[in-house]
Image (cartoon, rainbow, N blue to C red):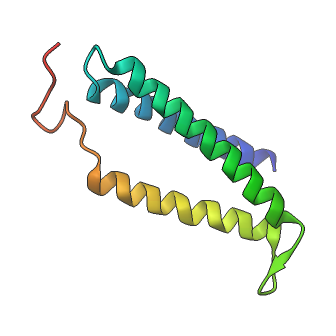
């Protein structure tokens, strides 16, 4: 479990600064506070909903798969979906030629 948590920490250490950088680069100076506010709100809502879903699934089983294991699979599937959506639709203004004038 310690190795899994360490790998999770490494992954978060790579993703979180990139998310903050993308939000900071995408929002102009006057809208940056609102953008970071929405980022935090959606992050906390996701944490709450993820915790509720995983705890409610943990005690049971679905089609022979233990609920705690199903929770891990759901997180993996959702992470891949989000990664594909970000790859296809997110535009980094500094690398797209549409840099904001500061």
Q: Identify the residue at image location x=9%, y=34%.
A: 97
Which residue occupies the foreground of this view, 88 or 9? Answer: 88
Image quarter of residue 48: top right
Tally of numbered discs: 0
21 over 70 or under it: above or below: above
Above-or-below relation of 1 to 19: below
Q: Which quadrant is home to the C terminus?
A: top left
Residue located farthest toward the left when viewing the structure as drawn:
97
Instruction: Indicate the position of residue 53 as horizontal and vertical percent values.
Output: 73, 58
Q: Where does residue 81 sit, x and y in percent of width and height?
A: 46, 62
Looking at the image, residue 40 sits to the left or right of residue 97; the answer is right
Q: Is residue 52 left or right of residue 79?
A: right
Q: Residue at x 62, y 60 (%)?
A: 75
Q: Is residue 45 left or right of residue 101?
A: right
Image location (x, y in percent) of residue 2:
80, 45
Q: Is residue 83 above or below residue 10?
A: below
Residue 66, relative to residue 4: is it above or below? below
Q: Residue at x 42, y 55 (%)?
A: 83
Q: Quadrant of residue 11?
A: top right
Residue that appears at 44% across and 25% down: 36
In the image, residue 79 lies at what x, y percent? Answer: 53, 57
Of residue 16 and residue 39, the one placed in the foreground of this image is: 39
Q: Residue furthest right?
A: 59
Viewer-proximal residue among 66 and 55: 55
């Amino acid at each position: 479990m310690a190795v899994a948590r360490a790998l999770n920490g490494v992954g978060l250490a790579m993703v979180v600064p990139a998310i903050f950088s993308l939000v900071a680069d995408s929002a102009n100076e006057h809208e940056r506070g609102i953008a970071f506010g929405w980022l935090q709100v959606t992050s906390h809502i996701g944490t709450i909903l993820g915790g509720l879903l995983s705890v409610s699934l943990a005690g049971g089983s679905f089609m022979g798969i233990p609920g705690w294991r199903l929770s891990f699979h759901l997180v993996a599937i959702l992470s891949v979906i989000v990664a594909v959506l970000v790859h296809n639709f997110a535009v980094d203004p500094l690398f797209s030629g549409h840099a904001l004038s500061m």
